[in-house]
Amino acid sequence: MKLVGKYIDKRNGSGYVTLRPEDNEDIWHLYNLIQQDNLVKAPAVRRVQNVSATGSTESHRVKLNLKIQVSKVEYSSSGGAQSSSSDQANQGSSSTPSMQSTAVLHISGKVVSENQYVRLGAFHTLDIEVNRDIRVEKSEGWDSIALARVEESCIPGRGAEVGAVVCGEGSAAFCLLSQHLTLVTHRISTSIPRKASAPGSSQYEKAMTKFYSMVYDAFVRHIPFGNPSLRAIVFASPGWVRESVYTWMTNEASRRGDKLLAKSLREKTVKVHVSSPHVHSLIEVLKSPEIVAQLKETKFAREGIVLDKFFKMLASDEMRAWYGPDHVCLAADRGAIGTLLISDELFRSSDPKTRKKFVSLVENVQHKGGEVQIFSSMHESGQQLNQLTGIAAILTFPLDVEVVEAEEREAAEEAEKNKEEGGEVKLR
């Protein structure tokens, strides 16, 4: 993401930023930045009809810069199309695939700046594309979470850090993991006959050879193995499939004379055992010692480590592992939070009060010296956290939930009693 322009009023935090998204992850950042009632200005194409003096109509498209007040924001990732035996194409020498943007962001709302083609108050949906400037204004103010995301998104040199192939016999999912996204770029599914179904298992061997070839061609097209930012290539599977796929790919790269692919496989490959050949097994990949040692400084690896630590604490000492908004806020009020786990989904609330509540919680924990880990809901670890209400905490000392809730009830009753007594005194 490129920061084109920025103005933030120091008194109340209101102002705007102008950004230029460059890839899928930048589109995801914009989705997390833009909220209801924000003002957004971006390029748009509008169909315009002209009526001639004779009464005939002519329709054509014009390019505009429209400014709307946001009422709805929708994000979708169009990666992960199913593949079949047609993936056998491209048998020549491979090249590093380009990282094309497949994410889509639709922003709907009323037009607030009139021009000759669009009347004031008309509804329009902006389709946000890469390499097109977009200006976001927040009249209610930019909070610390939003400003931190802008700053993080503009750090140069980002990109996919891990390419993963999660495979089984006849199936494979190709994934790219960046700081905030897990993108399934391609899938393969083909039938493999049982070994005993044919004499000498020749049918089985032919089917597996065909499958390996499909994996090789799809890997070349969908994993940017030559990119310097890609730190690891993971082959994950139950059983022996990962070893066979890796061996076949290295032999095939040598046979085709693809030195770049052979070098990348040799230097970056990590083979990991997982329990199932599905994408959700990536959470097991991120917890494996081989990946932790190699990628311990990356955001998604830290997320996996912290979430695993929380679940272990929940199993061994539940008084130090709390989850749920109400309970976590109670723990924060007592200065008990050592590590706060919170999903970015909570900051996308359409209710400003709810967002401000979680922003204040994060700032409170940080002010008291606690660690805050904001999970991306596009990673497997973030999706697991969302199943736990999206917020959890590892406490520095044990607290009994029932005792804390009883204390809160007593304090509320005491406050109500004092309020009533104060009212009676005034009446006298």
Image (spheres, rainbow, N blue to C red):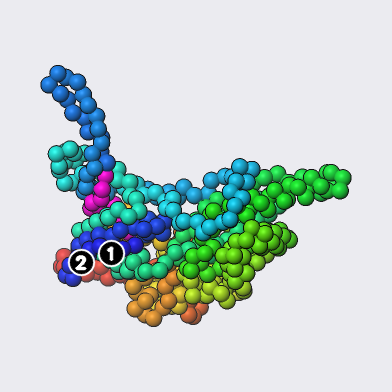
User: Toward which corner of the image does residue 262 lie, by quadrant?
Assistant: bottom right
Residue 330 falls left or right of residue 144 = right
Q: Is residue 192 magenta?
A: no
For label 1, the SS is strand
Disc 2 residue type (three-letter)? Ile
Residue 72 falls left or right of residue 299 = left
Residue range highlighted in magenta: 33-44
Report x, y in % for residue 175. 54, 57
Numbered mark located on residue 3 in the image:
1
- Would you call the spot at circle 2 few (<14 residues within 10 Å), some (14-19), or many (20 or more)? some
- Would you call the spot at circle 1 few (<14 residues within 10 Å), some (14-19), or many (20 or more)? some
Residue at image coords 83%, 44%:
197
One can see residue 289 in this view = yes
Disc 2 designates what residue?
A: 8
Report x, y in % for residue 302. 50, 72
User: Toward which corner of the image does residue 237 lie, by quadrant?
Assistant: bottom right
Foreground residue among 190 and 214: 214
Residue 43 falls left or right of residue 388 = left
Give the quadrant of the C terminus.
Answer: bottom left
Give the quadrant of the N terminus.
Answer: bottom left
Report x, y in % for residue 79. 49, 49
Residue at image coords 30%, 67%:
147
Disc 1 residue type (three-letter)? Leu
Report x, y in % for residue 403. 47, 73
Furthest toward the top, the residue is: 54
Q: CA distance from mark 1 to mark 2?
A: 13 Å
Q: Give the number of the mark in front: 1 or 2.
A: 1
Q: Is residue 321 above or below residue 171?
A: below
Residue at image coords 83%, 48%:
201
Foreground residue among 195 and 266: 266
Foreground residue among 423 and 252: 252
